[in-house]
Amino acid sequence: MSQYAAYFVSEWEWYQTHRERFDASLAAVEGRGVSDVLDIGCGAGQEMLPFVQRLGAHGVGIDVSQEAVEIARKQFSNAGYDGQVEFHCAPAESLQFADSTFDVVMCRLALPYTQNEKALSEMGRVLRPGGVIILKIHHWRYYWRRFWLALRDREIRKAGAIARAILSGIVYHITRRQPSRGQMPREVFQTRWLLNRILPGLGLEIRGELQNSDSNRRTPVFLIEKVTPESVRANRFESGRTRAAKF
């Protein structure tokens, strides 16, 4: 088994014994109907387990690594979920699914390595109205800490690569244009500030952060909803009540 494959299998095994993310994912969709789930940058696909195991949902995983796709298929087959999940080697920026296909879209730490706005647009397109995206990002604090750790350990080339990601993220936040290297987007950090400027134009809104999960200041996990006219009106009503209560 390659080192890459071993990493994916270890992630699957860790997920089985640490239930925080499992329970947090279920809590995030409580009260919502969930029949179809998409995991972008799925790795071994373990993030779909709460929905497949507990809710009986159909799961679809995509990853740009064919090796990850094969590992995910094997893991789910061994777990007895052959007919309930499918996996494809595909990029986040070009999802081969019809509009409004999924109730839940997950993307945990794949976004920094994609063309961000195109990937987010595709997530919103394939999500059903009222559906949710579970999105984990790399904040600038994540890269800043890694940069200083690399310097401490005298890993100069690694520190240089991290510095480029920080610089690319700064350029992206200022210009809304993600730097590229040829045809490939450069790795960038994200922030809630920037997401709040991108998402409304895609019909998406941040509803909060996942509780009791692995959300933290360096790699927060956001719950994002595809808004409907009804939910917009309800939010305006609640906001009005809150403002009135302050007076």
Image (cartoon, grey):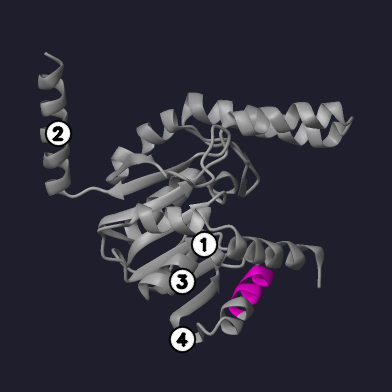
Q: Considering only order in the chain, which callout, 4 or 3, is on the residue closer to the N terminus?
A: 3
**What residue is drawn where x is 53% and y is 52%?**
108
Q: Residue at x 59, y 65 (%)?
A: 16
Find residue 238 and name its label: 2
Q: Disc 1 and disc 3: Cα gap in Å?
A: 11 Å
- Pointers 3 and 2 in contact (C-beta within 8 Å): no
Q: CA distance from mark 1 to mark 2?
A: 32 Å
Dot label at residue 60: 3
Picture disc at residue 47: 1
Residue ID at (17%, 46%): 231
Look at label 3 and name its amino acid: Val
Task: Say whether residue 179 is left or right of residue 54.
Answer: right
Label 3 to label 4, Cα distance in Å? 11 Å
Q: Could you tell whether 218 is left or right of 197 in the image?
A: right
Identify the image quadrant of residue 162. Answer: top right
Quadrant of image for the C terminus = top left
Q: Earlier in the sequence, mark 2 or mark 4?
A: 4
Kindly give the residue lying farthest to the right in the view shown: 154
Reading the image, the residue beneath label 4 is 83
Task: Characterize the local packing of mark 2: few (<14), some (14-19) or many (20 or more) Cα atoms within 10 angstroms.
Answer: few
Mark in front: 3 vs 2:
2
- Is residue 55 depicted above or below 40 in this figure? below
Q: Which residues make up the magenta segment?
A: 66-73
Q: CA distance from mark 3 to mark 2?
A: 35 Å
In the rendered view, tell whether residue 74 sits above or below residue 225.
below
- Distance CA(mark 1)–CA(mark 4): 17 Å
